[in-house]
């Protein structure tokens, strides 16, 4: 068993469900996590290492105090509860060229997933590839199209536009502008997404602060880069994506594989940042593929999925104890709990009667599908009989908690948008800056000019009886002219 360092403070006290103290019992509830619903405290916690490195902590605080106050006021503790979440996708075989006229079939991607995450907690979703982690994360972010059965509530309420404003979502594939620098990317995000109560200078300061917190100072003026030209590294890209969401100080932050493709030190730094964000009063949920034991120790809770079904949902530190109580033992003395969980989710049950080498050889063979399926079914039914009732009773208890419901009502006042004109100006500038390089591209200029000339030649000395064609041709000419103007404007900015 591997209890996370801070999570050893077990207590049987119940009833305090406020944001500052979280008290849990059983496998689903056992730890006390202290969450400070304050941006300034979390930012100073998180930035302490990077700021100390650069000796900047003292200089930043006075000028940022007003923005801290405004952003702190926007932070609302969010208790996310999901019960029996199920989701299916329609698989259409029609039109594939291999079959014809076959009826659509539905495939269950998620089946009966439940869990509770409170402010101050970091929950990780684990499972083999294709087990449904991203689908569950997207569902919890209120972004999954189609019908989801079961219930997902945020402080006891359904997903709403005010909740959407307080939710940050970092996708697996970073969506960034290749020709902007790190500083420009975060500054535009700040100008677009921070409330209009903040001045332009304060928004830029927030972007600078996030750069410091995420250790991006060294590459702040480097281009992000894209598939066609090299820019910042993969880890830095990921941190920029996280920074874009951190800027708005979301109360609920969801991240899809924030550490994939990163070295273990960078991955640890990112997870430590997420844990710092959680401890600042936020609810943080992440999917993760193969966490090291060091990373695993930083999670407060885990949900383990196997083919869309949960085999565990509860405290990260008690997972080994739970599976040992079911008779599953890793067999090795020092095993990363995450490896053990992934083996179980794949239906690979360790056989302690075999030697270590025999076990490795046995697990590597692919001819045990039936055994694996029956092992998965057994783990799923153990979850249903042991953990599911605890989770459901916890969810029902919380759903009637007046503190939780009142925090939801308080949150609905939050106003986050800047004016549309402001957004239009920022987007236009960003678009022009992103395309600036194209104005110098001879190939592009040649392409636009040749299309214009060829199109023009089609109507050269045309008869007035073709006036309709000429009228239709006008929008095309206007588009090309607009393109040319955009390129000219971009080259001047
Ligand atoms: N819209 C869809 N159409 C068809 N299949 C889908 C759709 N959405 C999800 N799936 C399937 O559902 C399963 C779960 O997908 P999901 O992306 O959630 O898995 P994952 O655990 O995040 O995988 P990975 O770790 O590889 O990212 C996959 O087998 C996927 O092919």
Image (cartoon, rainbow, N blue to C red):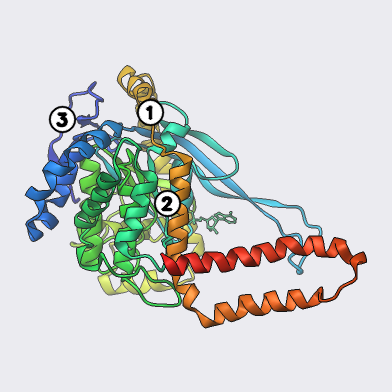
Position of residue 470 measured from the top left corner of the image (x, y, whole percent): 81, 64
Is residue 199 visible from the viewing direction of this image?
yes
Q: Is residue 395 left or right of residue 489?
A: left
The disc at residue 11 is 3
The disc at residue 426 is 2
Whether label 2 touches label 1, CB < 8 Å: no
Above or below, comparing residue 161 to residue 332 in the picture: above
Q: In which quadrant of the rendered view does residue 100 lie? A: bottom right
Q: In which quadrant of the rendered view does residue 389 lie? A: top left
Above or below, comparing residue 143 to residue 267 in the picture: above
Which residue in the rendered view is the most extreme toward the right?
Answer: 465
Q: Earlier in the sequence, mark 2 or mark 1?
A: 1
How crowded is the residue under tag 3: few (<14 C-alpha within 10 Å), some, or many (20+)?
few
Which one is nearer the viewer's eye here, 106 or 344?
106
Rounded to the nearest angstrom, the CA distance separating label 2 from label 1 is 43 Å
Q: Residue at x 43, y 47 (%)?
A: 137
Instruction: Kindly state the secondary structure of the residue where label 3 is placed.
Output: loop
Instruction: Kindly state the secondary structure of the residue where label 2 is placed.
Output: helix
Q: Is residue 35 left or right of residue 147?
A: left
Is residue 124 visible from the viewing direction of this image?
no
The disc at residue 395 is 1
Q: Nearer the viewer, mark 2 or mark 3?
A: 2
Q: Residue at x 22, y 31 (%)?
A: 22
């Amino acid at each position: 068993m591997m209890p996370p360092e801070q999570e050893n403070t077990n207590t049987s006290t119940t009833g305090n469900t406020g944001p500052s103290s979280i008290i849990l019992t059983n496998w689903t509830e056992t730890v006390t996590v202290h969450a400070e619903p304050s941006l300034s405290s979390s930012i100073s916690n998180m930035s302490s290492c990077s700021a100390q490195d650069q000796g900047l902590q003292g200089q930043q605080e006075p000028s940022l105090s007003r923005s801290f106050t405004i952003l702190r006021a926007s932070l609302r503790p969010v208790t996310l509860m999901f019960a029996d979440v199920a989701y299916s996708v329609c698989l259409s075989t029609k039109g594939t060229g291999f079959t014809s006229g076959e009826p659509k079939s539905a495939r269950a991607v998620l089946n009966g997933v439940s869990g509770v995450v409170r402010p101050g907690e970091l929950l990780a979703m684990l499972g083999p590839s294709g087990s449904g982690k991203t689908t569950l994360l997207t569902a919890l972010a209120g972004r999954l199209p189609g019908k989801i059965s079961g219930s997902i509530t945020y402080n006891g309420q359904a997903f709403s536009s005010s909740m959407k404003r307080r939710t940050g979502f970092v996708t697996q594939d970073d969506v960034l502008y290749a020709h902007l620098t790190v500083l420009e990317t975060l500054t535009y995000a700040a100008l677009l997404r921070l409330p209009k109560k903040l001045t332009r200078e304060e928004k830029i300061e927030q972007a600078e602060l996030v750069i410091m917190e995420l250790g991006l100072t060294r590459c702040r003026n480097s281009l992000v880069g894209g598939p066609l030209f090299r820019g910042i590294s993969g880890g830095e890209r990921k941190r920029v994506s996280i920074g874009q969401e951190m800027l708005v100080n979301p109360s609920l932050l969801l991240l899809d594989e924030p550490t994939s493709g990163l070295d273990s030190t960078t991955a640890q730094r990112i997870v430590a940042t997420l844990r710092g964000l959680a401890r600042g009063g936020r609810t943080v949920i992440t999917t993760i593929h193969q966490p090291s034991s060091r990373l695993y120790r930083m999670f407060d809770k885990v949900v383990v999925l196997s083919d869309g079904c949960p085999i565990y949902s509860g405290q990260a530190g008690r997972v080994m104890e739970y599976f040992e109580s079911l008779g599953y033992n890793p067999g090795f003395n020092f095993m990363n709990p995450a490896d053990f969980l992934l083996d179980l989710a794949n239906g690979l049950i360790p056989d302690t009667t075999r030697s270590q080498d025999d076990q490795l050889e046995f697990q590597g063979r692919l001819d045990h599908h039936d055994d694996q399926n029956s092992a998965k079914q057994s783990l799923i039914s153990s979850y249903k009989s042991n953990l599911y009732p605890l989770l459901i009773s916890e969810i029902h208890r919380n759903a009637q908690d007046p503190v939780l419901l009142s925090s939801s009502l308080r949150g609905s006042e939050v106003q986050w948008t800047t004016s549309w004109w402001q957004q239009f100006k920022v987007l236009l500038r960003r678009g022009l800056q992103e395309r600036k390089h194209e104005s110098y591209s001879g190939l592009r200029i040649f392409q636009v000019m040749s299309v214009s000339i060829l199109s023009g030649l089609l109507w050269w000395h045309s008869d007035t009886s073709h006036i309709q064609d000429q009228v239709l041709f006008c929008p095309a000419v206007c588009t090309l002219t607009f393109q040319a103007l955009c390129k000219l404007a971009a080259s001047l900015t």
